[in-house]
Amino acid sequence: MSTSDTVIDIKQLEFSWKENSPLTLDIEQLKIQSTERVFIKGASGSGKSTLLSLLGGVLVPQKGKIEILGQPINSLNSTARDIFRANHIGFIFQMFNLLPYLSVIENVILPLHFSAQRKQRVLKNGSIKDEALRLLAHLDLSAEDILSRATHELSVGQQQRVAAARALIGRPEIVIADEPTSSLDADRRDAFIELLVNECKENNSTLIFVSHDQSLESHFNRSISLSEINQARSKV
């Protein structure tokens, strides 16, 4: 895949949560290219998380087309969408969604249990544990006592970096981050974004980062205002 390839292509998308209710999203077109680092900004309740769920195939639109890596995912059944998402997309959630009964390393390698493709990418270059440790070290989380702890014993910043390593393992083509810095102070927030951006560059992953905090825009090479591409609000 060349860096000029389109990895996300949305056309004539319409989504509402209930039948015959006002649209939450109405997007005529949105294209994102391979290896772009895209910042999507919007106020709380503007539909940012809904858009990410559509990109990941968690939700499907009532109308329109969503192509991810050339695959029209809204035409797939739910099982096929789950498999596609596991193989190609790494998610960093706002609340991190770490499993408290697993160790740090077990949380990081969890996606490999659901994606043979990502697992094979890791095994081509070494062991699974070594790759997990490499990612954690690159994200400034490598102390042995931390790695052996349960995730609920970690600080918010540490949990955030574990969640990022989990999203990045196996070099997914697309990494999606949904407001993952909302609970951090400015210094830790900026440091985390730099670490995340650098790791995505190294992996040639496309990064889509969603936030209401416009001060983060400078970390990204493209910024999209959801209010400018979403026509639903103007129609309500």
Image (cartoon, rainbow, N blue to C red):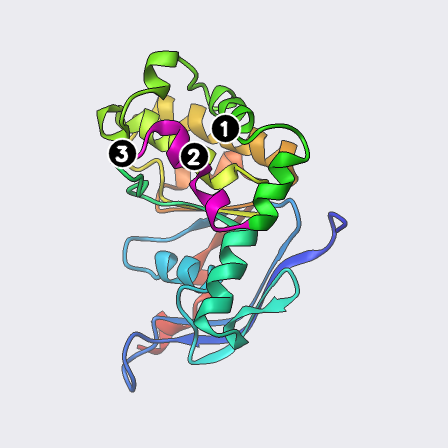
Extent of the magenta region:
101-115
Mark 2 or mark 1, earlier in chain: 2
On the image, numbered disc 3 is attached to which residue? 183
Q: Which of 97 and 3 is in front in this view?
A: 97
Query: Distance from label 3 to label 1 (Cα)?
Result: 24 Å
Q: Nearer the viewer, residue 17 or 74?
A: 74
Q: Which amino acid type corresponds to the residue marked 2 in the rendered image?
A: Val
Q: Residue furthest bottom?
A: 20
Residue indicated by mark 2:
108
- Which label lies toward us, 3 or 2? 2
Q: Residue at x 36, y 39 (%)?
A: 180
Q: Is residue 37 visible?
A: no
Q: Mark 1 points at which residue?
A: 132
Q: Which amino acid does label 3 sit on?
A: Ser
Q: Which residue is drawn at 31% across and 39% down?
A: 98
Q: Position of residue 174 (x, y in %)?
A: 56, 49
Q: In this rendered view, identify the residue nearer to me: 49 or 86.
A: 86
- Residue 23 drawn at (x, y percent): 34, 76
Above or below 185: residue 205: below
Work out whether 160 lies above or below 68: above
Distance Cα–Cα, label 2 vs label 1: 6 Å
What is the secondary structure assignment of the residue under circle 1?
Answer: helix
Residue 172, magenta (yes or no)? no
Q: Distance between the residues labelled 3 and 2?
A: 21 Å
The amino acid type of the residue labelled 1 equals: Ala
Q: Do the residues labelled 2 and 1 touch (CB within 8 Å)?
A: yes
